[in-house]
Image (spheres, rainbow, N blue to C red):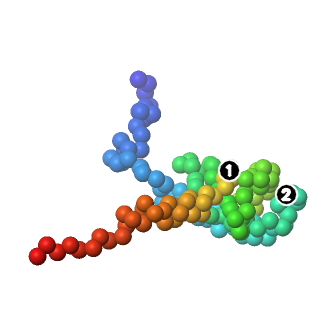
Amino acid sequence: MTRGKPDRSHFDRASVTGKVQDGPTQRMRRVAEDIRHRLSAVLARTDFRDPDLIGVHLTVAEVRMSPDLKHATIFVSRLGNIPTDPLLPALKRVSPFLRSAIGQGMRTKFVPDLHFQPDQALDEATRINRLLHTPEVVRDLTPMPDVDDT
C-alpha cells in the first residue's frame, strides 16, 4: 500500500451509501429532461441540410442518460404510425449539429454523445391492448355469477 490517498477502487456506490441504486439518479433525470426539451425544440424547426430529414416531423419520447452523463439514448418516433428505423442513419449524421445546438446554454461539463433509437412504447401498448382483448383473457376477467346454495 502506498502513502497518500487510500485505495478506494474497491468501493462501489452500494457499499458507500448503504443501498443499491435502482434506476436513474435525480441528476440523470434532470439532465435527460433538459436534453429532451432542447432537442424537441431543435427538431421542431426541421431545417436540416440532410435530404433524408427535410420536412420530417419527429417526436422525442424519452431520453435516458448514462450514469456518467456522457451518453444520451434518445427515443424518437414519427407522427402517425410511420417507421422511424430508416431515419436513424440520418439522425446519426446530424448528431454533431444537434449536440452543438443543445449544448448552448446547458450547465453541464460535457455535452453528451447522442444515440438514437426508435420508440417502441406505442407498439408495445398496442400489443398489450390486443392481448387483453383476446377471448381467453376476457373470459378470465368477467366476474362469475354468485351462486347461492340456500
Asked whether 115 or 138 is in front, the reply is 138
> How far apart are the two marked residues, 1 and 2, measured between alpha carbons?
18 Å
Say whether residue 96 is left or right of residue 105.
right
Residue farthest toward the left in the current orientation of the protein: 150
Residue located at (40% from left, 37% from top): 11
Residue located at (63% from left, 58% from top): 119
Q: Is residue 101 in sight in this rendering?
A: yes
Q: Quadrant of residue 123?
A: bottom right
Asked whether 8 or 10 is in front, the reply is 10
Q: Amino acid at mark 2?
A: Asp
Q: Which mark is residue 36?
A: none
Residue farthest toward the front in the current orientation of the protein: 150
Q: Amino acid at mark 1?
A: His
Q: Point out the tag, 1 or 2, that comes first from the N-terminus.
A: 2
In this rendering, the answer to whether 149 lies above or below 126 is below
Q: Which mark is residue 52?
A: 2
Asked whether 40 or 75 is in front, the reply is 75
Say whether residue 78 is left or right of residue 128.
right
Q: Position of residue 75 (x, y in %)?
A: 64, 57
Asked whether 84 or 12 is in front, the reply is 84
Instruction: Give the SS element for disc 2.
Output: helix
Q: Quadrant of the N terminus?
A: top left
Q: Position of residue 134 (x, y in %)?
A: 48, 62
Instruction: Give the SS element for disc 1.
Output: strand
In this rendering, the answer to whether 31 lies above or below 41 is above
In this rendering, the answer to whether 148 lies above or below 76 is below
Q: Which mark is residue 115?
A: 1
Residue located at (38% from left, 44% from top): 14
In this rendering, the answer to whether 122 lies above or below 88 is below
Label 1 crowd (10 A; few <14 / some 14-19 / many >=20):
some
Q: Quadrant of the C terminus?
A: bottom left
Label 2 crowd (10 A; few <14 / some 14-19 / many >=20):
some
